[in-house]
Image (cartoon, rainbow, N blue to C red):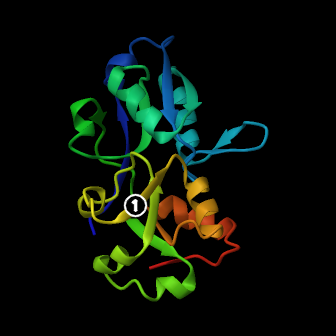
Amino acid sequence: MVKWIWGCWLLMPLLGLMAAPSRTLTVASSEWPPFIMVDEQGRMSGIDIDLIQALERHTGLQFIVKIYPWGRVLRYAEVGEIDMVFSMAKTLERERYVEYLSPPYIACPPAFYARPDLAGQIRNYQDLGAHQVGYVLKSAHFARFDNDAQLDKHGVPTETQLLGMLMRDHLQGVVAGSCHMDYILSRHNPAGLVKT
């Protein structure tokens, strides 16, 4: 499988913005634990929030963080409604309208998750063909999956919805970034989902 590269990208070069310390930038993302998490009171935490706070301390810039469904984040980036996104997989299509910083700070490969009885039946990509597979809309996983029109794929806005659909047996498995799905399942996994 192709690795899912996570990094932060900017719509404007950060070095040029450092000359204007009163500048406020809008950062958009979805909730992707452990990168960005939102508690019941709306407080944000996570790796990306820590990075944003460090950037504020070291650059004098101010960041406003907005949480949206992933498809909306991409649309806002494409039309210039936001200035910055963290934790975004790099694709050729996205490179048309964003500038990625290099090197990325994490590599997060995609993985397939299912209940233990089904997970044992998934030994290679072809085995997915007999199952309903969920994914987050507009996410980049790997070219073969992203471009496969033959698979019975079901896209939803968030991984929380994917897990709910798995729990209610509306899906048989999901493809997701292993970094955040492993984190989510380490905190709460009543269905005993496993990574294949």
Compared with 61, 186 (above or below) is below
Viewport quadrant of the N terminus: bottom left
**Is 72 left or right of 164, judged from the image as shown?**
left
**Is 48 left or right of 105, judged from the image as shown?**
right
Residue 50 coordinates in the image, percent (x, y):
57, 42
* Residue type pointed to by label 1: Lys
Secondary structure state at the residue bearing disc 1:
strand
Compared with 184, 60 (above or below) is above
Residue 110 coordinates in the image, percent (x, y):
39, 64
The image quarter in which residue 108 lies: bottom left
Circle 1: is it few (<14), some (14-19), or many (20+) Cα within 10 Å? many
| Residue under the point 32% across and 18% down | 16
| Residue under the point 55% across and 34% down | 68
Of the pair 189 and 107, the residue shown nearer to us = 189
Instruction: Tell me if I can see residue 170 in this picture.
Output: yes
Residue 109 coordinates in the image, percent (x, y):
37, 64
The image quarter in which residue 11 lies: top left
Of the pair 123 and 133, the residue shown nearer to us = 133
Compared with 43, 106 (above or below) is below
Name the residue that disc number 1 marks. Answer: 153
| Residue under the point 54% across and 87% down | 117
Of the pair 129 and 111, the residue shown nearer to us = 129
**Is 183 left or right of 26, judged from the image as shown?**
right
